[in-house]
Amino acid sequence: MEKYFDATYIWESLPVLIPFLKVTFLVAGLSVLFGTLLGFLLAAAKIGKNKFARKVANIYTTIMRCTPSIVLLFLVYYGIPALGENIGLNLNNVNTAVFVVITFTLQFAAAMSEVMRSAFASIDKGQFEAAVSVGLSHPQAYRRIVFPQAFVVALPNFGNSLIAVLQEGSLAYTIGLIDVVGKANLIIAGNYNAHTLEIFIALAIIYWVLSIAIEQLFLKIEKFFSKGKQALKTN
C-alpha cells in the first residue's frame, strides 16, 4: 500500500475511533471515582494527628509521584497475578481493564491527596473555630464551612488531574486493552502502517476536544461555585 498523506483518512477514522471512547471513559471514570475515595483517606491521614498514618500517606504519595505511569501499569499487570499465584489465586483471566483501573486509581489517589490537603490547608482555621463557637458541631462546621470552600479551591487541580488520567489512560493499549488508542493501533496495523500520521492526527483531535471540553466545564463549575461563595461573604 502506498504511504502518502491523505487528509480524508483523518475524517474517515473519526467515526471508527469515537465508539471506543466508551472504554476510555469507563476506565477513566472508575479510576477517578476510586482514586478520589482513596485520595480522601490519604488526605485525612496527612492532616490528621496520627504520625504513623501521616508518614505512610506521604511515603505512598512520593512513591506514586516517582513512578512513571507505564512502569506502574506493568508492575500492576504482571505483579498482581504473580502475588495471586503465591497465595493460590489464578488472576490470569482477569479482564485487562481491571489492571488499568487499579493502576490509575493508585496514581489519581496520590494526586488527589495533595489536592485535597492543600485545599484544606488554604482555609483559614479561624473560620472553623468561629463556626464551632456559635454552636456548630465539628462535623457540621466541616460540612457547612470548610468543605464547601475547599471544594472550590480544589476544583481547578481536580480538573487538571482528570485530564491527566484521560490522557495517561492511552497507555492501556500496551497491555492489550482496546480503547480508542488501541483501536487506532489496530487500524494502523490493518493498513500495514500506511496512513499512520493521519490516524494519529484523528486521535489527537479527539483528545484535544475532550481536554478542552473538560477544561471549560470545570471553569464554568468553578465560576458558578465562586459566585455562591462571594454571595455568602457579602451577606
Image (spheres, rainbow, N blue to C red):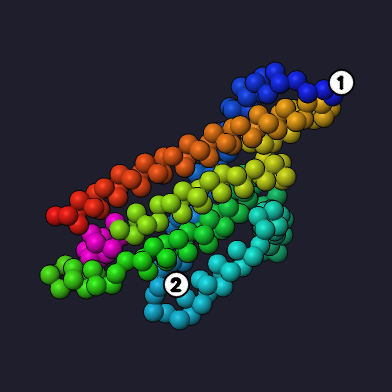
**Disc ID at residue 46:** 2
Disc 1 designates what residue?
A: 2
Residue 173, by quadrant, is top right
Mostly what secondary structure, the magenta segment? Answer: helix
Q: Is residue 134 left or right of residue 82?
A: left
The segment highlighted magenta reads 139-148
Amino acid at dot 2: Lys
Q: Is residue 19 above or below residue 87?
A: above
CA gap, disc 2 and disc 1: 58 Å
- Whether the magenta-drawn stretch holds residue 208 is answered as no
Which residue appears farthest toward the bottom when viewing the image? 51
Question: Which quadrant is home to the N terminus?
Answer: top right
**Disc ID at residue 77:** none
Q: Is residue 216 above or below residue 198?
A: below
Give whichever of 223, 174 is nearer the camera. 223
Q: Secondary structure at mark 1?
A: loop
Where is residue 212 drawn, in percent x and y? 51, 38
The crowding category of the residue bearing disc 1, from other C-alpha atoms within 10 Å (few below 14, some 14 to 19, many at least 20), is few
The crowding category of the residue bearing disc 2, from other C-alpha atoms within 10 Å (few below 14, some 14 to 19, many at least 20), is many
Where is residue 54 drawn, in percent x and y? 47, 76
Q: Is residue 133 left or right of residue 212?
A: left
- Whether the magenta-drawn stretch holds residue 143 is answered as yes
Q: Is residue 213 left or right of residue 93?
A: left
Q: Confirm whether residue 88 shows in the render.
A: no
Where is residue 159 drawn, in percent x and y? 46, 48
Which residue appears farthest toward the front when viewing the image? 234
Which residue is at a point 32% across and 66% down the rendered structure image? 123
